[in-house]
Amino acid sequence: MSQNANPINPPEGYKPFRDVIPAITHVGPFYYLSRDGQLRVGFRADDYHINASGSVHGGLMMMLADFTLCSLAIHGTDEGCATISFNSEFVAPAMHRQWVDASAEILRRTGSMVFLRGSVTGDGELALNFSGTVRRIRSKKN
């Protein structure tokens, strides 16, 4: 972590997610940055995010990745989504107090599905690669 980074606050430009699912509220807070059609989601690794080895728990990084997939798939719509498949590969650990950040790209969007891939980093260093497919759930509004 750089000496100028606040151990609590996100990097400049990130905003807190509001009204998210209870699981995210419980493990967060998660923050997002939306710029030029790109969406990044992240959190500052605090004491309660750390496993027995002193690194960010892998399940939490996978949760961040899955949340990022769905968030990007429905970004700017009134749709919901459900994860159909999720794949991940751990590359390196993310550590305590690092900014843990996920980004993804849409590979293909169909009428009912979105195919994506992305990565999670710890202070900019690759920690996890992931890909997934989400089902688009249309709003019941008329």
Image (tube, rainbow, N blue to C red):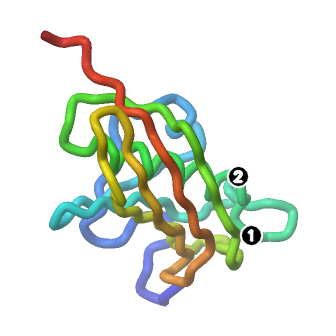
Camera-side residue of 48 and 67? 67
**Percent x, y of residue 59:** 70, 52
**Percent x, y of residue 75:** 26, 45
Residue 85 location, quadrant: top right
Camera-side residue of 114 and 141? 114
- Helix, strand or loop at label 1? It is loop
What residue is pinned by disc 2?
59
Real-space Cα separation, disc 2 to disc 1, in angstroms: 11 Å
Q: Label 1 sits on what residue type?
A: Ser
Give above or below for 33 relative to 21: below
Q: Residues within 10 Å of mark 1 (few under 14, many from 20)?
A: some
**Residue at the bottom extreme, as displayed:** 3
Give above or below for 10 relative to 67: below
Q: Residues within 10 Å of mark 2 (few under 14, many from 20)?
A: few
**Residue at the front extreme, as displayed:** 110
Q: How many marks?
A: 2
Which residue is at 46% across, 62% downward? 117
Q: Label 2 sits on what residue type?
A: Gly
Q: Quadrant of the C terminus?
A: top left
Give above or below for 120 relative to 19: below
Which residue is at 53% across, 48% downward? 66
Q: Which mark is residue 66?
A: none
What residue is pinned by disc 1?
55
6 left or right of 57 in image: left
46 left or right of 68 in image: right
Camera-side residue of 113 and 96? 113
